[in-house]
Image (spheres, helix red, strand yellow):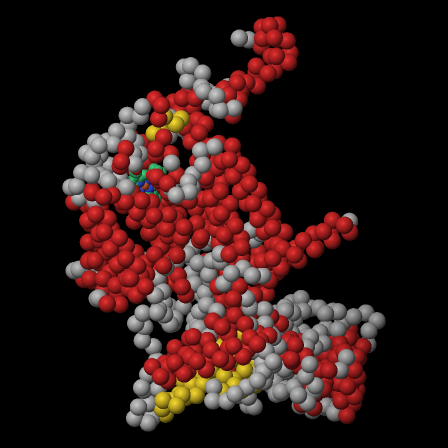
Amino acid sequence: MGLQENIRDKGVLGAVAAQADDVFTRLTAGIDAGEFRRMLQGEPPGRPNPRLKPHSEGFLLHIKPTYYHESVTRFTHTYRLGLLSTYLFIVETITGILLMIWYAPSPERAYVDMILLLTNIPFGQFLRDMHRLGAEAMVAIVTLHMVRCYLTGSYKPPRQFTWFTGVLLLVMTLFLSFSGYLLPWDQLAFWAVTIGTSMAEAVPPAVVGETVNLLARGAPDIGANGLLRFYLLHVLFLPLLLILFFFVHYYKVVHFGISLPADEEEVGEDTANRVPADKRVYYLPDVLVDETSFLTVMTALLIVLTVFFFQAPLEHIANPQSTPLHTVAPWYFYWLQGLLKIADKFIAGVLLPGVLLVLLMAIPYLDYNPSRRGKDRMVAIVAGIGAGAVMIIWSWMGTPEYAVEGAPSVEIVQDVMPEEGSGLSREIGYKHLPLGVWRTDEEYDVHDHEFMELLHEFNSAVDYYRRADPDFNAPIGILTITQAQPKLKKLNWEITWFSADGKEGEYKKTFWLHEDSLYWEQYGWKHLFMGYVADGWKSLSGALAGE
Amino acid sequence: MHRLYTRSPIAKIMWGILSSLVGIIALLMVLVSENPRMEAQTINWEGRSIENGAKLFSDNCVICHGPDGKGILGRGPGLNSYYFFTDTGRLKDVGWVGSLEDYVKLTIAAGRPSKTESQWPEVMPTWGGQFGGPLRGDQVVDLTKFVMNWEGSALAQTPDEDPFQPFEDVIRPTEFQNTAYILLSEEEQAAALEEYRARNIRSPQEIWTGEACFACHNLEERQVDVYGQNGPNMADLYERAGSRVEGMTAEEYVYESIVNPAAYLVETYEQAGKMPQNFAEKLSEDEIQALVAWLLNPDREQ
Ligand code: HEM
């Protein structure tokens, strides 16, 4: 109807309302205001059901099924883990693009850019912390999603290929996280990635391994070229690949329908797509409300964790000349690092992970048991739990807890004042480190609780290695604290001992600590955050009241 | 088992609203905290930079500049030194117009490779990677921050505490090669110099060589230099000086040309306008008068 006729028929107000309703209907791709109100009031849809229209006419919802089986909308069936994985990818994309504004992938700039981000960009640290936390959460959530699909037997026919693409997605998620690991260009990043790529070198024959390594690093060692390559993998190639495979994966999910709880159908049958009318839960509005509220809660959780608890670490700038003590892989590769401690590079770094990956992909084709019911799948479930336990043990072996042999003297100093990270010395900080000479073979009574604790830890570390190592006798630890400069203290750690055959040994390590350095803040909880809020609030309210 | 999942859309919407509020409040708290947080982060990274610099200094620099930066006698100058940090000290002596921080950074990065006749056994090496040295740019910055962090302790030094070693490249009488002189105000320094000059009057010949006048002026031969003349010839000065400027005697003209050389330029000379402008400060009045008379004397002694 034309506007004039409309006004003639309904009056001006009525015409405006009709026009507004028209716009609303276009925006929602088919839901008019009346239908929207009925949705809110929980009334059934009109007929023919206008709530299906946005799925057929709108782009955003065309990928979503119009209704689900009631049983699969239960939270405890999927735990919304696939949805959450997708959402985290979107969060990572948004925070990642914002971070790209202040980042240049070159060794001269990358690390400096990180510091600029932390010191000069409002919300810069928030973005970085969120991106890092989101990445680690995504690895965890994708893995959990896989575990749930394994436990519900959702990889069985007809969903074998869904599972297969899922494994590809898991691999991409891991590589995506790992490729981002290098970008801050600090010691943590540099050495984790150096070790990671060196595994590629173990691919036989040697020419192939070397070539793969060279391709990844862009040179025999990681440098400007390697950083650029990892950057491009991280911001372009892997995300595009992941998006492509996500759509394949999700297409399959929608095509076959989410598998029903196993008890609700006969063994060997798949009735996910035959949903009786009384079991249908329509996407609009029920599932939409459910998913939106779930993701809102998750967003709030992510924000709260980022703001109050999580700090992305930033160690010293990458230094190819000095390998820090105890370099560690990111936690999701601890298992690999653990394997590397007990087997050689080829077996642990290439063969076993390769076999594991192929096994994971092949699960749907190996497991010929048609039943998805837990009690029929004892072998599969026990094997799955066993595999999980082995992964956890390997991961534990990957931490520095397990079989890291360093000289006792080196380990003692690493314990109280590590090369990277904080350690108790930096945790108690500049003002709790009184000038003087402090020896482990003497007793002190300083009126500084924190410092006494440090002396105690120093003592017990020396004592521990004295008892543990027969080649480390009568050890003495000496800590000398001097004022090197205004606001700068020098901590000189010195350990002397006698070996089993009576030879005297000596080890010295010097660190400096500035009054303003916030190591603990960088590696621990954000315990200063509330202080910043208070300060900021004070100056803000002062400014508001003053002018 | 207690149901984790509730089917009531109202409850879900309430959860959504509640957590939106929580998220927004947390973000607002970040907003409020950003200024103090960024300040703390700024000084934090500054502090870390100084720590890194301390390590680099102790690995590379202490053998010449001393473990506490106070220099080593006859080997390297002190940096933790009043003379080095004060405005009227080193920067003024070398004529550097930028900041001390830039001077330190430049010296670390580039070194002093051009000095052939240095008073020190080894010249300051080039450290910056961009000039072929062993350190990266960030390490040069760290070292600079560390050296600059001596400011507080250096400026608190008394003249006796200052580990000052005379710089031979500074044109200043030896008795003023110390911090006590640096501590004087500009007027006091000028007065001290004036008094010194009154005590130590140099002959015109000493000035001629000591101030390197000969580098541009020819004293004995009436000839045109085959390479083109740098500055006016002095051999026939007594013939020309009186007629150069209307109304000026030869004495007045030569005097003016020494204390204010830019007043009358003869553009044909290759180095026209390059004569130093500061002879009025470097020479005492008596010295200038004697110099003028000597220059205008046709029978002057060489
Ligand atoms: C980036 C990573 C991934 C994303 C974004 C993703 C996304 C999704 C989504 C949205 C669903 C439907 C809802 C749900 O089941 O929660 C789903 C289902 C499924 N996913 Fe994934 N997934 C990912 C990784 C994986 C992995 C690593 C596996 C297994 C190795 C996997 C296997 C499956 C299977 C078998 C289903 C069907 C579940 C059923 O029908 O019950 N997915 N995925």
Residue B129 visible from this viewpoint: no
For this rendering, which residue is in front, B40 or A309?
Answer: A309
Report the image quarter containing ligand 1: top left
> Total label count?
0
Residue found at the very far bottom of the displayed protein: A502
For this rendering, which residue is in front, A220 or B75?
Answer: A220
Identify the residue shown where x is 37% and y is 72%.
Answer: A325
Residue B105's place in the image compared with B84, above or below, is above
Q: Position of residue A240 (x, y in %)?
A: 35, 42
Residue A438 visible from this viewpoint: yes
Residue B284's place in the image compared with A22, above or below, is below
Q: Is residue B62 left or right of residue A211?
A: right
Image quarter for residue B242? bottom right
Q: Is residue A92 left or right of residue B68?
A: left
Residue found at the very far front of the displayed protein: B1
Q: Is residue B234 left or right of residue A79?
A: right
Residue found at the very far right of the displayed protein: B247
Identify the residue shown where x is 41% and y is 56%.
Answer: A183
Q: Is residue A470 left or right of residue B244?
A: left
Identify the residue shown where x is 57% and y is 14%.
Answer: A18
Q: Position of residue B132 (x, y in %)?
A: 43, 71
Image quarter for residue B154? bottom right
Q: Position of residue A355 (x, y in %)?
A: 19, 54
For this rendering, which residue is in front, A198 or A14?
Answer: A14
Residue A527's place in the image compared with B163, above or below, is above
Identify the residue shown where x is 36% and y is 59%.
Answer: A331
Q: Position of residue B140 (x, y in %)?
A: 50, 70
Residue A286's place in the image compared with A543, above or below, is above
